[in-house]
Amino acid sequence: MSTAAPFDVLVIGSGAAGLAAAVSAERAGARVAIATKGSLQACNSAKAQGGIQAAVGPDDSPEQHAADVLASSHGTADLRLVEVLTGEGPSAIHWLEELGVEFNREEGGYRLARCGGATAKRLLQVGDRTGHALTKGLRDAWEGGAGASFENAPLISLEPRDGSWRAVCGDEAIDATTVILAAGGRCFAEAEVRRELSTNHPNATGEVTRIALDIGAEARDLDALQYHPNGGAWPANQQGYAIPETTRAYGAVLLNADEEEFTDSLGPRDVVSQAILDEVAKGKGVQTPDGRPAVYLDTTRIPAADAEVSLPYMLRRYRAAGIDPLTEKILTYPVLHYQNGGLVIDTDAETTLEGLYACGEIAGGTHGRNRMMGNSLLECVVFGRRAGRAAARKAA
């Protein structure tokens, strides 16, 4: 095992949260390293399709966004974290644009959509590959700096040492004054245990959370895992694919076997997922050709012009499989998607252990026990930036 030169800030993970934290810490003057389980940008964030929420519309506000977050969480979210999330949403968007991310626009402004649980149009998109665009912009910014990257270096152990930390990452022992955990959730591993499908990247296995808990960090709501309402159910190569929820934002609705609407298709995620499960349990679902339960997602109601701009990747995937979502309904069923809970943090993303920070899916409280779509990428950027700046200050 080799020992790397000491750093001010060590970031564990290289998704949107980790990259945002690393870029922000370096720009604050810190010596920064990223250690990541696989390669840079191999993460759930890069797979995120639907978009990122921020109150940038003329009929919206951070306060209204915060109210929607609290309502969708059924009152379980941490108000302090929610106010930071929504209050810094617009500046996070402008920062991403400075890094080269180009959001869809129309008529001189942003092209905004209303997503499930929202009371206003506030979802910004880069087609239906928003997560890829964000993580690419962040990765380019990181690689344009002077920070060090340790790839294929999963966190094996972490221990405090006289006001600093030692992390063993793969074959490297790395000393740092502060550490930021941004390694995501555990839904890929959880799906394997449950013998279910998951939308997650294979790196989402949760061992970094376990390491943090073992050294005394506190957590909340770790049992609150979220199902994406619209997992692909058929064809077989779409199973485990998260059909963008923007399909419903642009007009698609859920139908049972009798082709009747049975729920508000723009309701909160947990409500919509449960409605699908209940409909199938009542015998009003349909079966896929391989015998899996499903309901219809009537995507034929989406205007072609909207689909070509906001859902191009989804269209390509289904058309390549012989199905045109604009002319025939597709089959869908909830799929394991997101870890709502995580490590307890304050508004600077510091955990209950001094000098140890957490941001992104590994952290809890911002979404409570049920997350709205589009808020995960926002959380990654807002709290990644805060964690990076705070860790750099503490290390100075």
Image (tube, rainbow, N blue to C red):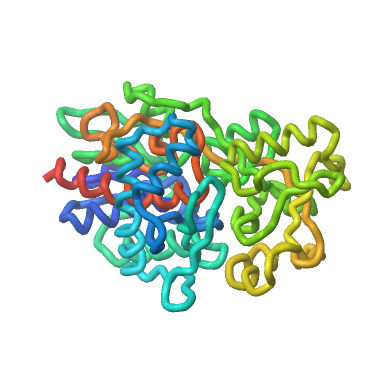
Which residue is depicted at the point 52% across and 35% down?
A: 186
Spot occupied by residue 331 in the image (x, y as percentages of width and height): 78, 50
Spot occupied by residue 378 in the image (x, y as percentages of width and height): 40, 51
Q: Is residue 347 left or right of residue 378?
A: left
Residue 43 in view, yes or no = no
Spot occupied by residue 314 in the image (x, y as percentages of width and height): 66, 62
235 vs 174: above or below:
below
Query: Furthest-left residue in view?
Result: 396
Query: Furthest-bottom residue in view?
Result: 107
142 vs 306: above or below:
above
Q: Quadrant of the C terminus?
A: top left
Identify which residue, 347 or 283, lies in the foreground.
283
Identify which residue, 76 or 44, lies in the foreground.
76
Q: Quadrant of residue 262?
A: top right
Q: Quadrant of the N terminus?
A: top left
Residue 308 in view, yes or no = yes
Spot occupied by residue 184 in the image (x, y as percentages of width and height): 45, 41
Identify which residue, 298 or 175, lies in the foreground.
298
Q: Is residue 222 left or right of residue 315?
A: left
Which residue is depicted at the point 75% across and 66% down?
A: 326
Q: Quadrant of residue 84?
A: top left
Which residue is depicted at the point 67% across and 29% down?
A: 194
94 vs 368: above or below:
below
Q: Is residue 87 left or right of residue 354?
A: right
Which residue is depicted at the point 61% across and 38% down?
A: 227
